[in-house]
């Protein structure tokens, strides 16, 4: 069986799990979705995704639970545990500690985002999809920004610093910040650059005065321009983003009157995994373009 056929089938399995991570799935049920023999499914899944199906389910459950622990402090840990599909808070705590080296209570008080991100360094198979692409003119936007430097997998820590600052300075409430759109502006492909060289700006569109601070938060402007905009639906996963960008650059743009610029690509994250399933996340990938100049 060809690799791309297997990848498409495994993407259906990952989509099923991520859309309802708290359900109970048998190996037979998942292998039926992939149309792969139960006896080969687990080996094939691990070779392509990097973890076993059981581990993938656990990661999907605990990713959602992690967000609830930090951003929904009104929720009791026992309720988070049960809604994540665990039979008891004790089982939830054991799984959480094995994966993140922190108890749920410790993580809620002081999440170690740097190590947390590395647990999700897996390759989610890209789903076969038709991208909605169109050229849009965006106005300039005033933003509050912070620069993340280093491993892209540790970016959650930097994002949390920005979010906490906005709440502490009363620009957003703890409730409204959960659904606020934000923009990331990477200056390199994280799959190609050295971890220590990776740099990315994280921005939230709000026009406000930022006083000098020790957190690295500053005011910035995203310049106006024309962009080829891809509406990407699904988990925010680097391989999926690269697949969509490649599709625009190699298949869509050459058939139009537009050509790409060398400026950084913008990623507009429209909604939040705090309020929708991973499979319903919407990201607008904005590739800077200009009209082709005919000789």
Image: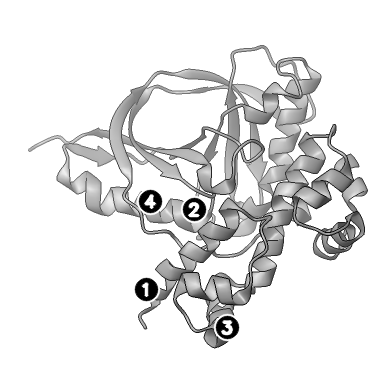
Q: Are marks 4 and 1 in contact (CB under 8 Å)?
A: no
Q: Residue furthest bottom?
A: 39
Residue at coordinates 59% horizontally, 50% vertically from top-left? 198
Q: Which residue is mark 2?
A: 189
Disc nearer the start of the sequence (4/1): 1
Where residue 113 sits: x, y (%)?
77, 48
Closer mark to the observer between disc 2 and disc 3: 3
Q: Secondary structure at mark 2?
A: loop
Structural distance between the alpha carbons of marks 4 and 3: 28 Å
Closer mark to the observer between disc 4 and disc 1: 1
Q: Which residue is mark 1?
A: 5
Residue 119 appears in the figure: no
Q: Quadrant of residue 92?
A: bottom right
| Residue sitting nearer the eye, 92 or 185 | 92
Q: Quadrant of residue 22?
A: bottom right
The colour scheme is one colour
Mark number, residue 244: 4
| Residue sitting nearer the eye, 70 or 160 | 70
Q: Secondary structure at mark 4?
A: helix
Q: Which residue is mark 3?
A: 43
Structural distance between the alpha carbons of marks 1 and 3: 16 Å
Residue 211 appears in the figure: yes
């Amino acid at each position: 069986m060809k690799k791309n056929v297997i990848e498409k089938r495994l993407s259906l399995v990952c989509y099923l799990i991520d859309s309802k991570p708290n359900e109970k799935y048998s190996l037979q049920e998942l292998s039926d979705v992939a149309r792969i023999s139960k006896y080969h499914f687990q080996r094939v899944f691990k070779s392509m995704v990097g973890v076993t199906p059981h581990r993938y389910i656990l990661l999907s459950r605990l990713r959602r639970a992690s967000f609830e622990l930090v951003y929904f402090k009104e929720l009791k840990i026992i309720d988070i545990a049960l809604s994540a599909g665990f039979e008891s808070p004790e089982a939830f705590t054991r799984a959480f500690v094995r994966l993140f080296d922190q108890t749920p209570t410790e993580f809620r008080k002081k999440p170690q985002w740097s190590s947390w991100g590395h647990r999700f360094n897996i390759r989610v198979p890209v789903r076969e999809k038709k991208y909605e692409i169109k050229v849009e003119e965006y106005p300039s936007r005033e933003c509050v920004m912070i620069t993340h430097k280093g491993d892209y997998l540790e970016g959650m820590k930097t994002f949390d610093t920005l979010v906490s600052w906005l709440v502490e300075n009363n620009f957003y409430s703890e409730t409204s910040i959960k659904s606020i759109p934000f923009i990331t502006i990477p200056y390199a492909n994280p799959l190609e650059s050295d971890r220590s060289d990776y740099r990315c700006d994280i921005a939230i569109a709000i026009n406000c005065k930022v006083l000098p601070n020790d957190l690295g938060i500053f005011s910035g402007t995203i310049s106006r321009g024309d962009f080829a905009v891809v509406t990407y639906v699904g988990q925010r996963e680097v391989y999926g983003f690269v697949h969509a960008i490649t599709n625009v650059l190699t298949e869509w743009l050459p058939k139009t009157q537009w050509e790409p610029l060398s400026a950084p690509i913008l990623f507009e994250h429209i909604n939040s995994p705090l309020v929708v399933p991973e499979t319903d996340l919407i990201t607008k990938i904005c590739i800077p373009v200009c009209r082709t100049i005919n000789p």
